[in-house]
């Protein structure tokens, strides 16, 4: 596609299958243009992104071509077309949206993540995250890249400086709030529409516990906090290369322990409220201490030289053949019977929070005072 756009832009439409866009509605403007309501590209994301990239390289970023060559290219490009199919589908017709996406991509390597952009929940969360927290919630591949480009071209529109991916935030929430750290790393399908974990999160029967934008926002804050500890393949600390999702679980487990000791309900919604208060507290030391205590648990647990480490968990050598990655992807990860060594590490961490002092009071008291305020 790139080569065709650069060398034969006038023939692009002859070689390309085109784009399919689903919309909730559309209107004809007086100038002859058509205004689309809630448009989503369900087939042709790569096509649209490639067109934008080439046009930006040649026309917007100070390309290396001379004025004469650029003018010649623009003349040829003006002769080109992209076949575009626009389908009006109401928001509540999610199954039809899914089928259109699946069948129009029958010859492409479509990813299941692409279906997130079609759900009413994700569209709603994206709007609320933008309005309430000034964060761009990416619900479709390439969304944040396209938004940044649009912001450069249109400086008068809302200028987002922060972004988050809805799929990743759902996994953060599941890891911590629901204790599904192993599934979050090893089973992506569970966290997509029609997946077991996705349904568990979004279809809670108790309306007071319903999942919403505030849960996503706190998951974002926890994700950002974890990023400061440099998890991932390039982590400088070896223990943090593969334990990101486990870290979310440990943070929430420590918080649950303190709340339970104070006879506080530890439902998912109460955990969200507690973390919201801790992250927004003027006393930053409170949340920092909780987060650093959790990171200490991870660093010790992932150290093969420690007695109560992952490497001494039941079944690590026999069932998982000494494979750390496979163990951390286990569905039972974090359960007391499956990970007794982890729970042995959590006990002294709880005692540290209960007994260590901060400004004359124990750290646990300082944390609970913020939560109860």
Image (tube, rainbow, N blue to C red):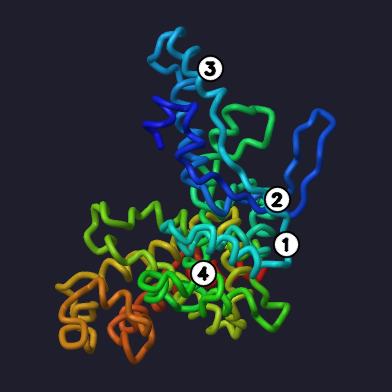
The relative height of residue 198 versus residue 103 in the rendered view (above or below) is below
Residue 8 x %, y %? 43, 26
Quadrant, the C terminus: bottom right
C-alpha separation, residue under disc 4 versus residue under disc 3: 44 Å
Please tell me the numbered disc located at residue 192: 4
Q: Earlier in the sequence, mark 1 or mark 2?
A: 2
Q: Earlier in the sequence, mark 3 or mark 1?
A: 3
* Closest to the observer, 175 or 148: 148
Tell me which residue sits at (41%, 58%) in the image: 109
Please tell me the numbered disc located at residue 75: 3
- Disc 3 on helix, strand or loop? helix
C-alpha separation, residue under disc 3 versus residue under disc 1: 39 Å
C-alpha separation, residue under disc 1 versus residue under disc 2: 9 Å
- Disc 4 on helix, strand or loop? loop
Tell me which residue sits at (60%, 62%) in the image: 100
**Residue neighbourhood size for the residue with mark 3, other residues' Cα within 10 Å, grouped as few (<14), some (14–19), many (≥20):** few
Q: Earlier in the sequence, mark 4 or mark 2?
A: 2
């Amino acid at each position: 596609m790139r080569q065709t756009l650069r060398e034969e832009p006038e023939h692009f439409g002859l070689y390309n299958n085109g784009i399919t866009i689903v919309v909730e509605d559309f209107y004809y403007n007086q100038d002859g243009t058509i205004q689309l309501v809630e448009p989503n590209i369900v087939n042709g994301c790569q096509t649209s992104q490639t067109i934008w990239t080439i046009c930006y390289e040649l026309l917007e970023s100070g390309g290396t071509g001379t004025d004469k060559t650029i003018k010649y290219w623009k003349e040829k490009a003006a002769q080109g077309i992209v076949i575009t199919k626009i389908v009006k589908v109401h928001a509540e017709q999610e199954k039809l949206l899914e089928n259109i996406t699946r069948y129009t991509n029958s010859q492409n390597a479509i990813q299941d993540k692409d279906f997130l952009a079609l759900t009413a929940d994700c569209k709603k969360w994206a709007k609320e995250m933008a309005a309430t927290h000034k964060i761009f919630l990416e619900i479709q591949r390439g969304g944040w890249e396209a938004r940044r480009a649009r912001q450069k071209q249109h400086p008068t529109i809302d200028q987002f400086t922060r972004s988050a991916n809805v799929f990743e935030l759902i996994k953060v929430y599941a890891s911590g709030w629901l204790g599904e750290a192993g599934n979050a790393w090893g089973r992506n399908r569970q966290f997509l529409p029609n997946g077991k974990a996705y349904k568990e999160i979004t279809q809670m029967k108790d309306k007071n516990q319903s999942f919403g934008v505030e849960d996503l926002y706190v998951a974002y804050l926890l994700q950002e906090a974890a990023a400061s500890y440099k998890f991932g393949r390039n982590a400088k600390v070896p223990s943090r290369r593969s334990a990101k999702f486990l870290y979310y679980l440990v943070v929430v487990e420590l918080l649950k322990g303190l709340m339970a000791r104070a006879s506080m309900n530890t439902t998912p919604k109460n955990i969200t409220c507690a973390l919201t208060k801790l992250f927004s507290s003027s006393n930053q030391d409170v949340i920092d201490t909780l987060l650093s205590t959790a990171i200490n648990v991870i660093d010790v647990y992932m150290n093969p030289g420690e007695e109560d480490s992952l490497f001494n968990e039941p079944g690590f050598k026999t069932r998982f053949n000494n494979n750390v990655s496979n163990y951390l992807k286990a569905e039972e990860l974090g359960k007391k019977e499956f990970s007794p060594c982890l729970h042995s590490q959590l006990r002294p961490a709880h005692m540290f929070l209960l007994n260590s002092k901060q400004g004359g009071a124990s750290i646990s008291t300082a944390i609970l005072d913020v939560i109860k305020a």
